[in-house]
Amino acid sequence: MVDNPFNVPVKIHIIDKNLNKNGEKLGTYGTIKGAKTFLGLSVPNTDMALVAAGYQFENLILYATNMGLGTVWLAATFSRDNFSKAMQIDKNDLFIAISPVGYPTEKRRIAENIMRTAMKSSSRKSWDKLFYFENFQNPMTETLAVDYAIPLEMVRLAPSATNSQPWRVLKTGNTYHFYETHKQNTSKEEALIKQVDLGIALSYFHQTSLEQGLKGKFEKLSQQNIDIPSDTHYIIS
Ligand SMILES: Cc1cc2nc3c(=O)[nH]c(=O)nc-3n(C[C@H](O)[C@H](O)[C@H](O)COP(=O)(O)O)c2cc1C
């Protein structure tokens, strides 16, 4: 079962265009062509809800990918109101994202290539920009990470909205602390989606650690003794 370790009741929805009784127009601003089936993601507005949503939906996406299905997170480029009505999203919940599910074409379309170039979608930040050892002045290396080099590398490769890669990880003692970073002038919606990105990163870290037989648990820990840079926000350890 696709679940999350943060005790948040994440809601997953599914809709088929052909079975949509009320006929709302389910559009994706030209980003997706031919998809008929869509997954949706919503959560109650509580602590850790966005992180849990990112974690759980990414696990579902990985599951679908493993079945040979094509997916893509859409948090911005979809007709939110129409999907919300069609999927009967609770008015009190946060409606975070959708993903088409279907068989992908072999070749990328021109519009997709243009978008990917603009966001540098195929590149990722290097280790020294993301991971730190003992304090935020000291970059983490693969050698210092020992057994956790692969889980951290999977975090580095994770997808994120506009490919912003807002995750930062600090290792102190035996503990990995996870943070989200965004500039002060970032819009509220954009800042919130970065918590979803952190959930995705935690899914990659957790799934890879389990695969590697590494043991641990998620816990919110005091950050009092840690000098955290500005624009960097603690999530969980
Ligand atoms: C939370 C989230 C939201 C996203 N929202 C959109 C979106 O609204 N439209 C879109 O075309 N791509 C969206 N993406 C896809 C990202 O742009 C893409 O993952 C990123 O550029 C990295 O490319 P890659 O996943 O192919 O490595 C989203 C990805 C994530 C993780």
Image (spheres, rainbow, N blue to C red):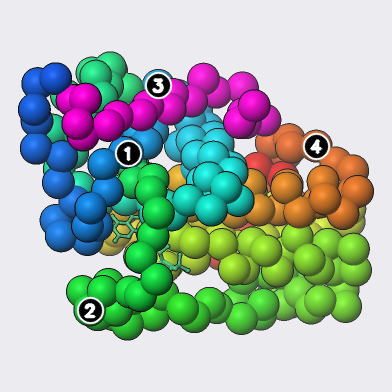
| Residue 131 picture location, percent across and down | 68, 69
Label 4 sits on what residue type? Lys
Badge count:
4
- Dot 4 alpha-carbon crowd within 10 angstroms: few under 14, some 14 to 19, many 20 or more: few
Q: Which of marks 1 and 2 is nearer the N terminus?
A: 1
Crowd rating for badge 3 (residues with CA inside 10 Å; few <14, some 14–19, many 20+): some
Mark 2, residue position: 110
Query: SS at mark 3?
Result: strand
Name the residue rendered at 53%, 45% in the picture: 64
**What residue did someone put label 4 on?**
217
Position in image of residue 112 (x %, y %): 27, 72
User: N-terminal of the two: label 1 or label 3?
Assistant: 1
Above or below residue 170? Residue 220 is above
Q: Hey, which quadrant is residue 44 in on the image?
A: top left
Task: Tell me the tag on residue 190.
Answer: none
Left/right of residue 145 with respect to residue 63 in the rendered view: right
